[in-house]
Amino acid sequence: MPRIVLLVTSPRLPAGLLTATAWDVVRAAPVLVAEESELTTALRSAGAEVRVLDGPPVPALLDAVAAHDTVVWLAGPAGDESVARELGLRLAREPGLAELELMYGSWDPPGARLLDAVAVLDRLLSPGGDPWKRAQTHRSLARFLLEESYEAYDAMSAGDTDALREELGDVLLQVVLHARLAEELPEDERWTIDDVAGGLVDKMIRRNPHVFAGAEAGTLEEITANWERIKQAEKARDSVLDGIALSQPALALAAKILERAARAGVTAPLPAPQAQPDPESTLGAHLLALVAQANATDLDPEAALRRTTLAHAQTLRTTETTPPPSPG
């Protein structure tokens, strides 16, 4: 039975990166395509017969399959659903003409849409792109990274996984945007999204020897301790507190400082509220003591205060909408 092969390939992989089966087919049968591309160039370079159509594809495919027994339609990035549908209906009405075969010559690997994100941001920040984005700097965008991270946190707290997917996309936008901006830095300061991803990959491999280097896994506590040892060796910091993000909210900052010190075995008395010189310092000492108490009981003081505050906010909203009691 003559056959028409609908060959689908990934536009996100290098041209010519096809399966062995796909290469066998395109070398043995004529390839028809709607327009020139890097893939058609690669196929011709490998000796394939490629013809670009200047008219409707279905009649041309049927003529070609009658002459060659097998013909390949090189589908576009969207898979050419309309061509496949028209061919399928025609062959269903006339079953003796040919059979239609769908073949994947290549397919997107996991994470392929990240390449699209990089390409879109490159277009937006290149000449002729979005003037607003092209005018930004790392500093001018800093608040947006915080805002998007908080919105993702809100989605996590609400248990809304659909919202979380969208908000993480907004966080990813900030990452890719900053990486693209860094490509415009002076040559000795320049870096790219590949440098970001490469640094992450190298770090994960180094810090997880129980996964990548055959080290003994041990308990979760031992894995965490080993992570910290590797991290300290990498950073060569003067203090166990170096590297803590000082711009995070105060309760979270206090919890992180106390946690980092406790993990390293560094202790010091907490400031005594009664010994403080002014009301603000006294309040700060009381709050720090509460954070220490939360850490000791494995509670997150930032999350606890946020939860209680939001609950109180809802109470206030309810109070606003509740009519006052009528006079007796």
Image (tube, rainbow, N blue to C red):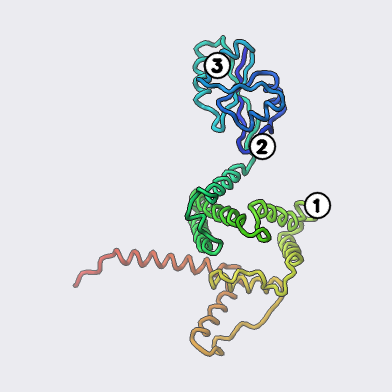
Tell me which amino acid carries mark 2: Pro
Residue beneath disc 3: 60
What residue sits 56% from the left and 90% below the top?
275
Q: Residue 42 carries which label?
A: none
Other residues around mark 2 within 10 Å, as few (<14) / some (14–19) / many (≥20):
few
What residue sits 48% from the left and 53% below the top?
131
**Which image quarter holds the C terminus?**
bottom left
Distance Cα–Cα, label 1 vs label 3: 58 Å
Other residues around mark 3 within 10 Å, as few (<14) / some (14–19) / many (≥20):
few
Other residues around mark 1 within 10 Å, as few (<14) / some (14–19) / many (≥20):
few
Q: Which of marks 1 and 3 is in front?
A: 3
Tell me which amino acid carries mark 1: Gly
Q: In this view, does 141 lie to the left or right of 9?
A: left
Secondary structure under the numbered disc 3 in the rendered image: helix
Tell me which amino acid carries mark 3: Ala
Residue beneath disc 2: 14
Rendering coords of residue 125 (x, y %): 54, 51
Rendering coords of residue 273 (x, y %): 55, 86
What residue sits 56% from the left and 70% below the top?
247
Distance Cα–Cα, label 3 vs label 2: 28 Å
Residue beneath disc 1: 214
Q: Nearer the viewer, mark 2 or mark 1?
A: 2
Query: Which numbered disc, 3 or 2, marks the residue that appears first in the sequence?
Result: 2
Q: In the picture shown, does residue 252 fall above or below 200?
A: below
Question: Front-most of 23 and 292?
Answer: 23
Distance Cα–Cα, label 2 vs label 1: 34 Å
